[in-house]
Amino acid sequence: MDIKKCSVCGIEKKVDEFFKRRAGYDHKCKACRLAYNRERYQKTIAPYRKKYSYGDIECKVCSVCKQEKTISEFNLQHANGHGYSKYRPECKICQSAKARSNLKIKASRKIYNLTHKEELKRRKVAYLSNPENLEKSRAYAREYHRKNPQRQRDRLFKKYGITAQQYDEMFQKQNGGCAICGTKKNGKKMNFIIDHDHKTDAVRALLCTQCNAGLGNYRDSPSLLRKAAAYLESFNP
């Protein structure tokens, strides 16, 4: 067993009594390291950590208006287990004012987006014209859809005017596959695409990515699809 000498207590100990570091072992043994960490915490961190008791307190200073008020004027928040106050830092009045301010900000942003629609579109096109920005946007979208798959489904259901139950019923009628080729898998995508009429926006069926792209490439024209089929059949032996 390897032996190592502690730089603090000067005692030679087994390496198991030293914390493992990325490059070897710590120069302090575990006992000396823990004692050093406790002493450093009491000197540098503990004096600046304002803690509150979970017991009953009568007054509290609001972090916004800086006024000392009775505890009944503060809302409770979930206790985080670190000794901080179980009451919100801002009083009820300041909390309500903050909520109203956020609603006003959201409303003003919505009005701005509606009145500057074309300008925002031009700015978006200019931003995405940079390949680096385009890749950042795509990476963010992929990560967002990975973390929020249900949000994407809800957006599509709202767009096409159907419910999740109607989608599942269509999926069952198609035996769990594409309405054209019948494939049961849709590549990396979890759900089949909702195909719709681009003139009337009426939902038609659920298709895989390739079949849906094929219809789009042929501009949803039955005559072009028939010509394409005849073209392929003419080369068959």
Image: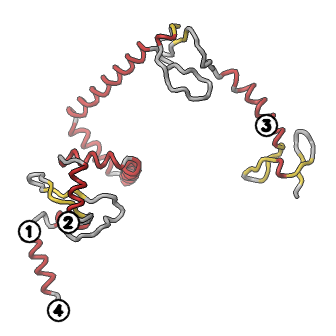
Compared to residue 101, the image places residue 32 above or below, namely below
Q: CA distance from mark 2 to mark 1?
A: 16 Å
Q: Residue at x 24, y 58 (%)?
A: 193
The picture places residue 221, in percent across and down from the top left corner, at: 9, 66
First in sequence: mark 1 or mark 4? 1
4 and 3 marks in contact (CB < 8 Å) = no
Q: Nearer the viewer, residue 74 or 33?
A: 74
Reading the image, the residue beneath label 2 is 179
Q: CA distance from mark 4 to mark 3?
A: 82 Å
Question: For this view, does 53 lie left or right of residue 167?
Answer: right
First in sequence: mark 2 or mark 4? 2
Question: For this view, does 9 lie left or right of residue 174?
Answer: right
Query: What element does badge 4 sit on?
Result: loop
Reading the image, the residue beneath label 1 is 222
Q: CA distance from mark 3 to mark 1?
A: 77 Å
Q: CA distance from mark 3 to mark 2?
A: 66 Å
Reading the image, the residue beneath label 3 is 34
- Tell me the kind of residue under disc 2: Ala
Query: What element does badge 1 sit on?
Result: helix
Question: For this view, does 48 lie left or right of residue 25?
Answer: left
Reading the image, the residue beneath label 4 is 237
- Tell me the kind of residue under disc 1: Pro
